[in-house]
């Protein structure tokens, strides 16, 4: 059983569908429960795509990773439906590659709230269930820690810091 945050589209959905192809149970946790005006996919269409790809089961759980109760609900629903969690994929992220002088406080807080805190908190909530699994894994969609100065120039340093927070959770 895989729990995938930010799994309604993009890389998160691709990972979920690949695991579904192997017959895994998939739990899609993301905010998009109704169609977005410009972005494709919802938690429901993602679950349907996983079933079509061969998932043994698929569950869509609307989850705002910034909402502690919603994140707890994601974990609780996964365990209630499938009896446990084997893999947690922390994919939910926010991005702003704006320069240091351009990034807003609101966007900075959003990136750190989702990328760093969200990854940590979801992992914390899943950990008791992962520890009962035969072969538990946590996959964080974040880069290796690299202190090369090119990642800390004026453009994108806030995003780099937020993604490194995700990496530190590993």
Image: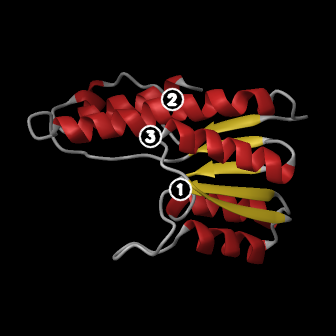
Dot 3 falls on a residue whose secondary structure is loop
Instruction: Find disc 1 in the rendering and name its residue.
Output: 30
Neighbor class of circle 2 (other Cα within 10 Å; few <14, some 14-19, many 20+) is many
Residue located 55% across and 63% down the image:
8
Foreground of the two, 69 or 35:
69
Foreground of the two, 35 or 87:
35
Instruction: Find disc 2 in the rendering and name its residue.
Output: 167
Residue located 18% across and 35% down the image:
105
Name above or below for residue 20 compared with residue 122: below
Q: Residue furthest right?
A: 134
Name above or below for residue 39 compared with residue 122: below
* Quadrant assignment, res 12: bottom right
Q: Position of residue 123 (x, y in %)?
A: 63, 31
Residue 66: give its label: 3
Neighbor class of circle 3 (other Cα within 10 Å; few <14, some 14-19, many 20+) is some
Q: Position of residue 92 (x, y in %)?
A: 49, 47
Q: Nearer the viewer, mark 3 or mark 2?
A: 3
């Amino acid at each position: 059983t895989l729990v995938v945050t930010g799994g309604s589209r993009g890389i998160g959905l691709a990972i979920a569908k690949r695991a579904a192809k192997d017959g895994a149970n998939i739990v899609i946790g993301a905010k998009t429960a109704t169609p977005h005006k410009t972005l494709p996919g919802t938690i429901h269409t993602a679950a349907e795509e996983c079933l079509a790809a061969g998932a043994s089961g698929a569950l869509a759980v609307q989850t705002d990773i910034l909402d502690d109760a919603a994140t707890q609900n994601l974990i609780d629903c996964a365990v209630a439906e499938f009896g446990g969690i084997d893999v947690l994929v922390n994919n939910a992220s926010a991005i702003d590659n704006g320069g240091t002088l351009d990034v807003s406080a609101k966007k900075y807080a959003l990136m750190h709230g989702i990328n760093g805190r969200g990854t940590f908190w979801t992992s914390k909530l899943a950990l008791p269930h992962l520890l009962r699994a035969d072969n538990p894994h946590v996959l964080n969609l974040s880069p290796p820690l690299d202190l090369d100065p090119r990642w800390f120039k004026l453009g994108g340093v806030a995003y780099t810091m937020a993604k490194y927070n995700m990496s530190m959770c590993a």
